[in-house]
Image: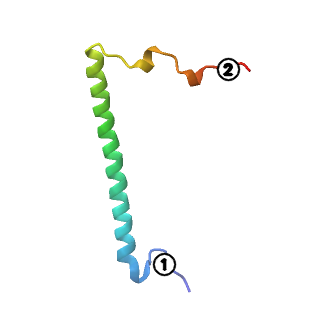
């Protein structure tokens, strides 16, 4: 007896709907992150054009310093 790997049984509608919903949500989140990234880069460029710099760009990160002990 061979089984069809694409036979999802009586709950096929629910299974397919859940995959489509999950794909839509994940795609929406990825799109949201990409749009927000572009907005953040634009906002940062505007601030730098006004002469406002990031403090992290001018100071050294204390977590990256080596400690002797």
Direction from residue 19 to residue 47 in the image, left or right: left
Residue drawn at (28%, 33%) of the image:
39
Read off the residue under disc 1. 4
For residue 5, above or below residue 37:
below
Q: Which mark is residue 62?
A: none
Which of the image's four quarters has the N terminus? bottom right
Residue drawn at (44%, 74%) of the image:
6
Residue drawn at (44%, 14%) of the image:
58
Observer-side mark, 1 or 2, equals 2
Residue at the right extreme of this rendering: 69
Which badge, 1 or 2, comes first in the chain's sequence? 1
For residue 21, above or below residue 27:
below
Label 2 sits on a secondary structure element that is loop
Q: Which mark is residue 67?
A: 2
How many dots with numbers? 2
For residue 62, above or below residue 18:
above
Between marks 1 and 2, how big is the CA–CA gap?
62 Å
């Amino acid at each position: 007896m061979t089984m069809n790997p694409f036979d999802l049984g009586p709950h096929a509608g629910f299974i397919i709907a859940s995959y489509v919903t999950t794909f839509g949500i994940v795609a929406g989140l990825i799109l949201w992150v990409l749009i927000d990234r572009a907005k953040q880069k634009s906002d940062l460029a505007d601030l730098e054009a006004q002469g406002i710099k990031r403090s992290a760009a001018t100071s050294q990160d204390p977590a990256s310093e080596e400690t002797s002990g």
